[in-house]
């Protein structure tokens, strides 16, 4: 039930995160894409996409540092 005067969110953050992650992979059904266009808030998508891209880049940097670590004490 909704309270009068309080807007009801059209979608959840989980749905936004799911849509952004699917877009990173590049696999998406056209019907689901159309639903996302109608329901998702563009500002939420931008925020989640920036956060996911930042986590991806930091993960790559951590992986490279882990792989390229020079053994010490030789």
Image (tube, rainbow, N blue to C red):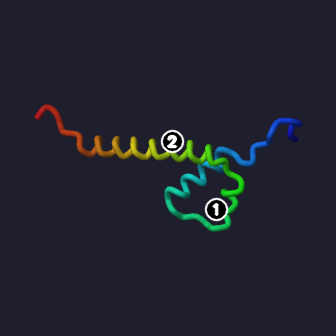
Q: Which residue is mark 1?
A: 33
Residue for point 36% across, 46% down: 60
In the image, 65: left or right of 51?
A: left
Can you say which quadrant of the picture contains the C terminus?
top left
Residue for point 56% across, 46% down: 46
Label 2 neighbourhood size at 10 Å, few (<14), some (14-19), many (20+)? few
Residue 54 higher or lower than 39, as above or below: above
Residue for point 56% across, 42% down: 47
Label 1 sits on a secondary structure element that is: helix
Which one is earlier in the sequence, the residue at label 1 or at label 2?
1
Can you say which quadrant of the picture contains the N terminus?
top right
* Cα–Cα span, label 1 and label 2: 21 Å
**Which of the 4 quarters of the picture holds residue 28?**
bottom right
46, 28: nearer the viewer: 46
Label 1 neighbourhood size at 10 Å, few (<14), some (14-19), many (20+)? few
Identity of the residue furthest to the left in this view: 74
Q: Could you tell me residue 21's position as x and y percent?
A: 54, 53
Please give the label number shown on residue 51: 2
Identity of the residue furthest to the top in this view: 73
Residue for point 65% across, 44% down: 13
Label 2 sits on a secondary structure element that is: helix
12, 38: nearer the viewer: 38
Residue 66 higher or lower than 39, as above or below: above
Identity of the residue furthest to the bottom in this view: 30
In the image, 6: left or right of 58?
A: right
């Amino acid at each position: 039930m909704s309270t009068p005067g309080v807007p009801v969110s059209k979608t959840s953050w989980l749905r936004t995160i799911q849509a952004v992650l699917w877009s990173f992979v590049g696999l998406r059904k056209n019907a689901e894409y159309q639903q996302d266009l109608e329901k998702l808030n563009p500002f939420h998508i931008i925020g989640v996409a920036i956060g996911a891209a930042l986590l991806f880049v930091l993960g790559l940097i951590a992986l490279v540092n882990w792989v390229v670590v020079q053994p010490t004490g030789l």
